[in-house]
Image (cartoon, helix red, strand yellow):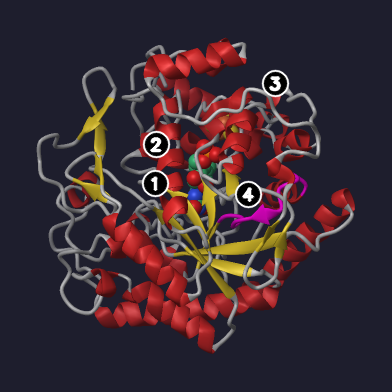
Amino acid sequence: MAKSKPKFTRIAQLKSAENFMSYLSSIQADLPFKEQLSETFESSMGESYKLKSGAIIGNRFCILPMEGWDGTSDGLPTELTRRRWHNFAISGAKLIWGCEAVAVRSDGKANPHQLLINKQNLDAFKSLYHDMVSDHEMKFGSSSDLLIGLQLTDAGRFAIPDKDKIRKPKTLYKHSILDKKFNISEDHQVLTDSEIDQLIDDYIRAAELAKEAGFQFVDIKHCHGYLGHEFLSAFKREGKYGGSLKNRMRFLKSIVDGIRATSNIAVAVRLSAFDWIPFKKNDENTGVPEQPNQEYKEAFGGCNSTGIDLTEVFEMLEYFEELGIELVCITAGSPYYVPHIQRPALFPPSDGYLPPEDPLIGVARQIQITHEIKKKFPNLAIVGSAYSYLQEWLPNVAEEVVDKGMADFIGLGRMVLSYPEMPDDILKGKELTRGKICRTFSDCTTAPRIGLISGCFPLDSYYKKKSDAATLKAYKKKHRI
Ligand SMILES: Cc1cc2nc3c(=O)[nH]c(=O)nc-3n(C[C@H](O)[C@H](O)[C@H](O)COP(=O)(O)O)c2cc1C
Ligand code: SF4
């Protein structure tokens, strides 16, 4: 990718709330904004939230799941994994969603170093959970209002499970664009119904192990183009897992039924609530739809190429209430084919493209869609995502969103890689440490795309010193990223 200067104003240049607000109106970004933050300890961000089970979540910050590409090849955590989980535990957030995607079986790993939950690895998950709780207690005195879940996944068409780093996709239907984009051969066989039945049993077993390890809920991941998400767009698949929404949700329902009959751990879902046609880069390296004028019918929550239609999302969420799913984390699209709608950034990752819109528009889109959902489902506990690009202005948007009931929790992803204590600093009314604010350089995505560990190489001194930092720098220089 030829190096190009970002086309959009950098957030750090918007020095005052007035500047920021007038910039928002100049680009027509519909973002809630609280000009004057509340006094310390009076902010809605510090209010607790009570789930129907009676469990209390002590404030409105949620740490979003983020893979680190740093487990062992057996799917066990390493020092790097433990450091990241420790950082999440001492962030000040009381809802920990994840902490990262954990595969329920080996052939479903998104990368050869993804964590894997199975009987052999159970003790390691027990110690990850217990370390988090004790690290949190050490800093904050109590963990009675801390809720920690585990995100369960199968990477589906994006599986790269083995040391050979070859993609070994598991797909549910022949996709009109993604099969070609990701070199899936024409004779590739989609998963059979009985293979899916087995996978459901793996999820149920994994949930039992998560409960035994101590986790308070499991997320049956339905986002970002991975297998759970692909079910939702399996419109043209035949048989019991495709076609009608009821059939496309059968995978989730069967897992929930199985969990209810076994461990009965609480079930949450992270959902890509809208999706778009895959993007590619044009001659100027800017993102454009792969086939702009094509009718596109493979986007759950989408319509045509870049439209949004929440009709089925609402139907699905209605069903969540029946299934007893209360915690829902809203996200969008996929980092593999529409990264700009999923994790808005000024600087693209190596496999991405220059943003086709101001990243603030992407942030606003996720916030507004999450609001639409919250309005319709006041009884669901809704977590929003994609706040990191707000940088200095994150506290002002977050507090306004929670004040107005547009979401119940503010999810933080990249920001807590570079600045883990940001939630605690905001809650305590401390001035933000500017040098730690994530500037969306995307190195935490580029590094794993080229087989390195993920982490905040530009801002976290721990990663800056690693040999992978030099390899990443050389790669970016060579490829002019
Ligand atoms: C390095 C990295 C790894 C991620 N891994 C996961 C994951 O394992 N599961 C998941 O649901 N989302 C994952 N995400 C997406 C984030 O949870 C989040 O949705 C996204 O970064 C947007 O939020 P942000 O603007 O606060 O970063 C990952 C993001 C990054 C940057
Ligand atoms: S590498 Fe650091 S600064 Fe860049 S996007 Fe990731 S967390 Fe943010």
From the viewer's perspective, is the residue at label 2 or at label 4 nearer?
2
Residue 62: which numbered mark, if any? 4
Q: Closer to the camera, 457 or 434?
A: 434
Tell me whether the residue at label 3 lies in contact with that at label 4, contact meaning CB atoms closer than 8 angstroms: no
Could you tell whether 109 is left or right of 410 in the image?
left
Residue 62 magenta-highlighted: no
Tell me the residue that label 1 is attached to.
332
Could you give the CA–CA distance between mark 2 and mark 3, rounded to whole angstroms? 26 Å
Q: Closer to the camera, 283 or 231?
A: 231
Where does the image place residue 358, in percent across and percent down from the top left? 39, 22
Q: Amino acid at mark 4?
A: Cys
Could you give the CA–CA distance between mark 1 and mark 2, rounded to whole angstroms? 10 Å
* Magenta stretch in the rendered image: 90-100
Could you give the CA–CA distance between mark 3 and mark 1, rounded to whole angstroms? 28 Å
Earlier in the chain: of badge 3 and badge 4, it is 4
Residue located at (72% from left, 29% from top): 461
Where does the image place residue 417, in percent across and percent down from the top left? 64, 38
Asked if 344 appears above or below 84 in the picture, the reply is above
Where does the image place residue 202, in percent across and percent down from the top left? 46, 78
Classify mark 1: helix, strand or loop: loop
Q: Amino acid at mark 2?
A: Arg
Earlier in the chain: of badge 2 and badge 3, it is 2
